[in-house]
């Protein structure tokens, strides 16, 4: 297992470096000039020159990347030009919000998608299979922002059960926090549940036709035990991989959902930074997201190797 982990880390580090170089270079394609935008309407040449020198905007692109990469290695992600705050502080403020939303959404997705996928595979060709596929198709087809607006109209405007927007820290009030997060978590989890259901169904169908499953049935093992004890663990590898990828996508910021429900997470931070040409914030959020993706993929590889030892030789 140690050699497997070392091989995966050897691939992860170059990937992270390449991702940082790409995002740093692509930001230079954004229209407009940061120094000119920050000076306002007056555009004093001395102020513009000071800003360029302070943020190394007058240096060549490779030199600017070296300054930024050196700071990242020291734990310094730079300073937000717009907010005049360290990017690391902004990430620490916003990450718990998105992390909570992502965890709740994944709980919704797993609670709906995996049982539906197992039931659909076991009841293949029957009414339960048709209903489960119909629900999955609905989850894939409905846009998140539209579903979010409908939920707000129903549960906030008409029934008055839940707040329409905003965020309350769980340390201030756990009940108000859950009330504010339940709708955006369901909106995000609904879409992921549909994908989880389809992958779980496909994986289970492949396993249920295996020889060892037929042998277990021939020995008189109960259908429930065959499904949960023999089939589901062997179908878990693609489910684990998909779950890690989807969780990473949630952490990168569910932009539309956070905008609809005014959740102050990574998505809103990224959108505001792009519109304001706050390059340091964009770079910090993207590198944090890339590192999270890599860590989650590494965790998925380790879990998959634990489930199936054959993968340790891959």
Image: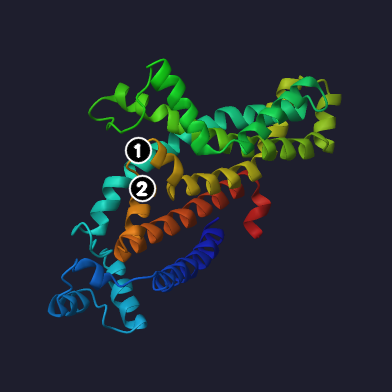
User: Which residue is at a point 35% across and 38% down the rendered structure image?
Assistant: 262
User: Which residue is at a point 39% across and 42% down the rendered structure image?
Assistant: 259
Q: Is residue 208 left or right of residue 22?
A: right
Q: Is residue 122 above or below residue 32?
A: above
Q: Are marks 1 and 2 in contact (CB under 8 Å)?
A: yes
Label 1: element kind: loop
Q: Which mark is residue 268?
A: 2
Q: Which comes sooner in the sequence, label 1 or label 2?
A: 1
Q: Is residue 77 left or right of residue 12?
A: left
Q: Nearer the viewer, residue 161 or 280?
A: 161
Percent x, y of residue 118: 69, 29
Residue matched to label 1:
262
Percent x, y of residue 254: 45, 45
- Can residue 151 be seen here? The reply is yes
Direction top: furthest residue? 159
Label 2: element kind: helix
Q: Nearer the viewer, residue 212 or 41?
A: 41
């Amino acid at each position: 297992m140690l050699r497997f982990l070392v091989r995966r880390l050897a691939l992860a580090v170059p990937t992270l470096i390449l991702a940082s170089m790409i995002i740093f270079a692509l930001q230079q394609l954004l229209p407009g000039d940061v120094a000119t935008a920050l000076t306002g309407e007056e555009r004093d040449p001395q102020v513009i020159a000071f800003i360029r020198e302070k943020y190394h905007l007058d240096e060549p692109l490779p030199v600017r990347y070296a300054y930024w990469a050196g700071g990242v290695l020291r734990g310094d992600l730079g300073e937000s030009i717009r907010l005049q705050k360290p990017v690391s502080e902004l990430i620490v403020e916003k990450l718990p919000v998105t992390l909570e939303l992502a965890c709740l959404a994944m709980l919704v997705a797993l609670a709906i998608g995996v049982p539906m996928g197992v039931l659909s595979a076991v009841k293949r060709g029957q009414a339960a299979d048709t209903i489960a596929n119909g629900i999955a198709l609905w989850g894939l087809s409905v846009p998140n922002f539209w579903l979010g607006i409908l939920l707000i109209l129903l549960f906030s405007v008409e029934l008055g059960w839940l707040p329409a927007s905003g965020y309350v820290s769980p340390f201030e009030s756990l009940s108000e926090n859950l009330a504010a997060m339940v709708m955006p978590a369901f909106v995000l989890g609904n879409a992921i549940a549909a994908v989880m259901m389809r992958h779980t169904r496909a994986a289970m169908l492949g396993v249920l036709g295996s020889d060892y499953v037929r042998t277990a049935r021939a020995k008189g093992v109960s259908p429930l035990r065959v499904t949960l004890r023999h089939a589901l663990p062997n179908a878990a590898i693609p489910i684990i991989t998909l779950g890690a990828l989807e969780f990473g996508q949630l952490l990168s910021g569910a932009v539309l959902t956070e905008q609809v429900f005014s959740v102050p997470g990574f998505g809103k931070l990224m959108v505001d930074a792009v519109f304001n040409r706050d390059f340091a914030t964009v770079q910090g959020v993207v590198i944090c997201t890339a590192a999270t993706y890599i860590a989650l993929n590494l965790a998925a590889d380790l879990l998959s190797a634990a489930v199936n030892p054959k993968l340790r030789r891959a």
